Image (tube, rainbow, N blue to C red):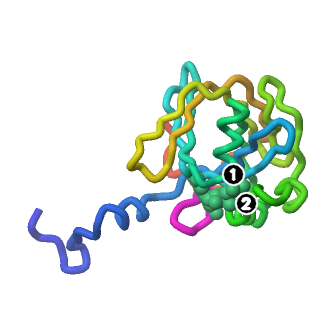
Amino acid sequence: MNDLREEEIKLDMGTIEAVMSLPPAPVFLLAVGKEDPNITTIGMFNVFSVDPTVVGVGIKASRHSYKLLEETGDFTLNVPSKDMVEAVARCGFISGSRMNKFSEVGLTPEPGKRVRSPSVAECLLNMEVKITEVQDRGGWDHIWIIGNVVHTDIVKDFDRSNALIYWDGEFRTPSPVLKHL
Ligand SMILES: Cc1cc2nc3c(=O)[nH]c(=O)nc-3n(C[C@H](O)[C@H](O)[C@H](O)COP(=O)(O)O)c2cc1C
């Protein structure tokens, strides 16, 4: 274990830098709200249970979407395709507090089937989520909004290699499969 060549020596780079060095993960358009729905870009996502299907998103209290999540009690998580990268980036930089982001970025709200929030028609996969838990741990920088997935819609020819992934300022698509299990 002590024969690492010089270029392979590991460094203690700090916790934040280490976390930001992780590989990318799915990025979503979260849509929320009944009367004036909003969309925002979300990278902080986790699957908490597969069966039943429970997912969560980390969101800062300062976001307009956070206020709408509290008011509405549900949301949709929408998987954008690689062709939507510009809209996804834009939804992550502008706030819906003073504008309608759907029309601003040219996306279409589609009525939710089992939730009050709309889904995003252009996305490959839509998950409708009813909020069951809000985890606000005070010192943490994101509040975790957790809920049950109550309905999904997916394009017939879904191919996850066309979905966007993101981390630390970089949008990508998943690379080719190395091995099938
Ligand atoms: C790729 C990307 C991922 C993001 N992920 C998150 C996230 O997980 N949680 C969060 O609170 N903000 C995240 N943001 C920032 C929000 O999308 C951004 O602040 C947005 O303008 C908030 O909009 P709103 O005020 O209309 O809710 C992300 C931004 C980008 C570009």
Question: Along the polypeptide, which appears first: circle 2 or circle 1?
Answer: 1
List x then y, in percent, for residue 53: 58, 25
- Location of residue 71 (image quadrant): top right
Q: Does the residue tagged 1 have its C-beta within 8 Å of any atom of ligand 1?
A: yes
Q: Is residue 145 left or right of residue 122?
A: left
List x then y, in percent, for residue 58: 54, 46
Q: Secondary structure at mark 2?
A: loop
- Spot the residue most to the left: 2
Q: Relative to residue 137, is residue 91 depicted above or below?
A: below
What residue do we see at 58% from left, 25% from top?
A: 132
Q: Nearer the viewer, residue 83 or 76?
A: 76
Q: Are marks 2 and 1 in contact (CB under 8 Å)?
A: yes
The residues colored magenta run: 165-175
Residue type beneath disc 1:
His
Q: Gap in Å between the C-alphas at discs 2 and 1? A: 7 Å
Disc 2 marks which residue? 95
What residue do we see at 52% from left, 57% from top?
A: 24
Q: Is residue 50 left or right of residue 77?
A: left
Q: Does the residue tagged 2 have its C-beta within 8 Å of any atom of ligand 1?
A: yes
Residue type beneath disc 2:
Ser
> Is residue 168 found inside the magenta-colored segment of the image?
yes
Mark number, residue 64: 1
Q: Secondary structure at mark 1?
A: helix
Q: Name the quadrant where ligand 1 sits.
A: bottom right
